[in-house]
Image: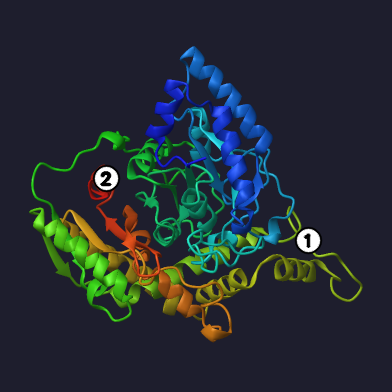
Amino acid sequence: MTPYRSFSAVQADLKSGSITCRQLVEQYLTRIEDHKSLNVFTEIYADEARQQADAVDQKLTAGTAGKLAGMVIGIKDVLSYSGHGVRAGSRILENFTAQFTATAVQRLLNEDVIIIGRQNCDEFAMGSSNENSAFGPVRNAVDPDRVPGGSSGGSAVAVQAGLCLASIGSDTGGSVRQPAAFCGVVGLKPTYGRISRWGLIAYASSFDCIGPIANTADDAALLLEIMAGADEFDSTVSSNSVDTYTTAHLPDRPLRIAYLRDGVESEGVDQSIREATLNRIQALQKAGHTVEPIDLTLLKYLLPTYYILTTAEASSNLSRFDGVRYGYRSMPTNTSTSDLLSLYKKSRTEGFGAEVRRRILLGTFALSASYYDAYYTKAQQVRRLIRQETERLFEKYDFLLSPTTPTPAFRLGEKTGRNSGEDPLQMYLADIFTVQANVVGYPAISIPNGTDANGLPIGLQLMAPPFAEGNLVALAKSLQGE
């Protein structure tokens, strides 16, 4: 099987009769088996996907099929799907079954999408390499000795390796866009509140966004179009009308594009990424657009602000996982678990991985009475300043352009093992260009921008004002030649 790289190609073959949804599912299941070593899926819904495919084939024959008939997707292991396990890549949710279906997932099912399985991710979406999963690391299909990025690493590799046509991930600080860049696919983070978070296991509630990963910006736009919109179950979701993103067009004038000077001049950015970004900037200038360098005066405060606030929110959100109501519980012994408090401590220590424990501790510290004003309150103030600076930027420009990541995919263990000196800051720096969109709640997309000398994918990031996903997708399609 030659993997399909666009939904339009799938639809054409379904219409011509050269393939059925059942045959398509069987081909994907074969590819998943052939690529088991990449460790992409934590659970495969083989029989259920076949049944869904048969039902969709019947609808296609009857002319009653939905917009996504024939699209086979995977979902990240943080999205609830009623009657199916959901683990968030963690031991703490061992044997837990979702009691309801996330709004975004249900809207896709209503349009006859076929869900083929649940995809591996960093534990509770905390990570930039997919090495923090209780199910083991996911491997990059281009080079299995390298990471796929995180936390939606399994979702990105599934699309990269042709194990499904698209995936649904989540993005708290770049967790859709960063793995998309490392894997050479498209990752779209919408405006905060554009897609309901109902059914998404929370990491940091004021940052979390559900977003699609696909081979083309057009397919990402279609998935966004269906998932977006108001939802009575989520008080933070926007009631703004949903545009037809798949038919969006750019303004009939030259664009005004800012690019981050540090993205092409900083020595901390890999040379191949600097060159690829600069080449794209020059091509846009030759096409008649205004493309100018800008400096973010608060750039050095982005990561500290992001990590103080997200760890604080994680500390609060993850307090519900206590080993009593559901999920993993430490087995009591005479010496280790003698009372309720010790049961909490043992269950959480054994159930959570090292990175999750680290972030809970950091967040609890930032929220403690002695340090609340010094860290949490100050970070909220800086977040407001960053948003104000970003608002001023978009009063003048239509888009902000930068590399998605400062380096191509790094080797497994490179930033977590002995060679890194066990310094988590080295891993956190991988998010330097992506966190701004989450701090301010703006939409952003990562698209492929060539490869380096080793054939490793490079990503280009575009950011737009709130609810300008139509323009964002239109420019991405133009740059991809769609």
Of the pair 66 and 375, the residue shown nearer to us: 66
Q: What percent of the width, then of the height, locates residue 86?
A: 65, 49
Q: Disc 2 marks which residue?
A: 477
- Taking the image as shown, residue 109 lies to the left or right of residue 176, namely right
Crowdedness of circle 2 by 10 Å Cα count: few (<14), some, many (20+)? some
- Identify the residue at the far right of this view: 334
Image quadrant where residue 407 sits? bottom left
Q: Quadrant of the C terminus?
A: top left
- Looking at the rendering, which quadrant does residue 384 occupy? bottom left
Label 1 sits on residue: 329
The amino acid type of the residue labelled 2 equals Lys
Residue sitting at x 52%, y 50%: 158
Q: Residue furthest top?
A: 62
Q: Secondary structure at mark 1?
A: loop
Q: Position of residue 316 (x, y in %)?
A: 56, 63
Residue 94 sits above or below residue 348 on the image? above
Residue 392 visible at all:
no
Looking at the image, tell me whether mark 1 or mark 2 is earlier in sequence order. 1
Q: Is residue 452 left or right of 68 when viewed as pictured?
A: left
In this picture, residue 322 sits left or right of residue 423: right
- Three-letter code, disc 1: Arg
Q: CA distance from mark 1 to mark 2?
A: 48 Å
